[in-house]
């Protein structure tokens, strides 16, 4: 490397001159946007809409877009102030992080509160009716909940009075030989789901006569 000084003469004088190295001028670094404000999430059946307000500071250049990232890793990009995520799992809690983007890059993110998509329960399955004398006992299997716990079942027969216990209901006060039907629907905090239906005709229990059975002597008592 050469010496940063050199001499030159001005008339009878000898002058010492310092040689300066070239200076590289870098462009100024522009700031990224501030965090979005007022982030909210409204969940529905298998989906959720996330909304927000623009940051108080857009940074050094105008905001060009927003990125919204679920805690599962799914990312949506928009130029607006809302996005809707679909294909979510009912009953699962999510969060979303919103970032504003300008020419300098994405800014600081704002995280939403937890939100949980919920849907209506499904229709009960395997609905059957066991008839008796002036009554019928309905039995069914609990359906998919839609994400919220089932709190009760609505049982609606075409006649009679219903008593319920879990996934069993007994309809009494019916007329033997008359055809009836009943519907069953599950209820959650979201609402009442679709119904399952069954038809039945109550009648006195029919037992074979004693003549069809051998004498008791063939069957020892306990």
Image (tube, grey):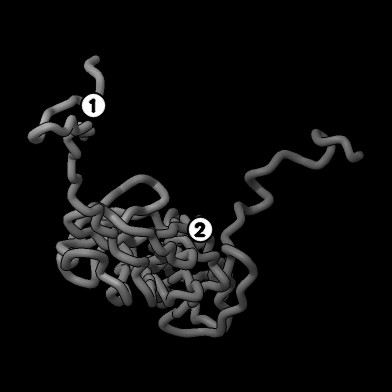
**Front-lying residue, 135 or 155:** 155
The residue that appears at 72% across and 39% down in the rendered structure is 214
Q: Say few, some or many: other residues with alpha carbon within 10 Å of mark 1 (under 14 / 14 to 19 / 20 or more).
A: few
Query: Label 2 crowding class (10 Å Cα cut-off): few <14, some 14-19, many 20+?
Result: some
Instruction: Look at the image and tell me in which quarter the N terminus lies.
Output: top left
Residue placed at 17% from the left, 35% from the top? 22
Question: Quadrant location of residue 161?
Answer: bottom right
Q: Which quadrant holds the C terminus? A: top right
- The picture places residue 180, in percent across and down from the top left corner, at 40, 76
Q: As drawn, which residue projects farthest toward the front? A: 12
Q: Kindly state the secondary structure of the residue where label 1 is placed.
A: strand
Q: What number of labels is visible?
A: 2
Q: Which residue is mark 2?
A: 142
* Side (left or right) of 10 relative to 169: left
The answer to which of marks 2 and 1 sits earlier in the sequence is 1
- In the image, what residue occupies the spot 38% across and 59% down? 109
Viewer-nearest of labels 2 and 1?
1
Q: Is residue 195 visible?
A: no
Q: Nearer the viewer, residue 170 or 53?
A: 53
In what element is the residue under mark 2? Answer: loop
Q: Position of residue 84 (x, y in %)?
A: 25, 64
| Residue 165 shows up from this direction | yes
Identify the residue under disc 1. 5
Q: Work out whether residue 110 or residue 205 is closer to the camera in this orientation and state it.
A: 110
Residue 124's tag is none
Q: Position of residue 89 (x, y in %)?
A: 38, 53
Q: CA distance from mark 2 to mark 1?
A: 93 Å
């Amino acid at each position: 490397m050469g010496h940063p000084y050199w001499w030159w003469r001005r008339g009878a004088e000898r002058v010492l001159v310092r040689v300066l190295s070239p200076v590289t001028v870098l462009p100024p670094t522009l700031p990224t946007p501030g965090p979005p404000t007022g982030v909210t999430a409204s969940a529905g059946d298998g989906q959720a809409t996330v909304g927000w307000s623009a940051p108080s500071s857009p940074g050094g250049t105008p905001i060009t877009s927003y990125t919204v990232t679920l805690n599962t890793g799914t990312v949506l990009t928009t130029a607006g102030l809302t996005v809707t995520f679909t294909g979510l799992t009912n009953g699962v809690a999510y969060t979303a992080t919103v970032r504003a983007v300008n020419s300098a890059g994405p800014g600081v993110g704002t995280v939403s509160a937890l939100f949980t998509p919920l849907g209506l329960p499904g229709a009960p399955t395997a609905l059957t009716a066991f008839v008796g004398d002036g009554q019928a006992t309905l039995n069914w299997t609990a359906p998919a909940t839609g994400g919220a716990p089932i709190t009760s079942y609505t049982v609606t027969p075409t006649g009679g009075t219903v008593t319920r216990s879990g996934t069993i209901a007994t309809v009494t006060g019916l007329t033997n030989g008359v055809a009836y039907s009943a519907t069953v629907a599950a209820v959650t905090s979201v609402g009442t789901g679709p119904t399952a239906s069954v038809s039945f005709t109550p009648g006195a229990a029919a037992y074979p006569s004693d003549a069809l059975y051998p004498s008791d002597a063939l069957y020892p008592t306990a």
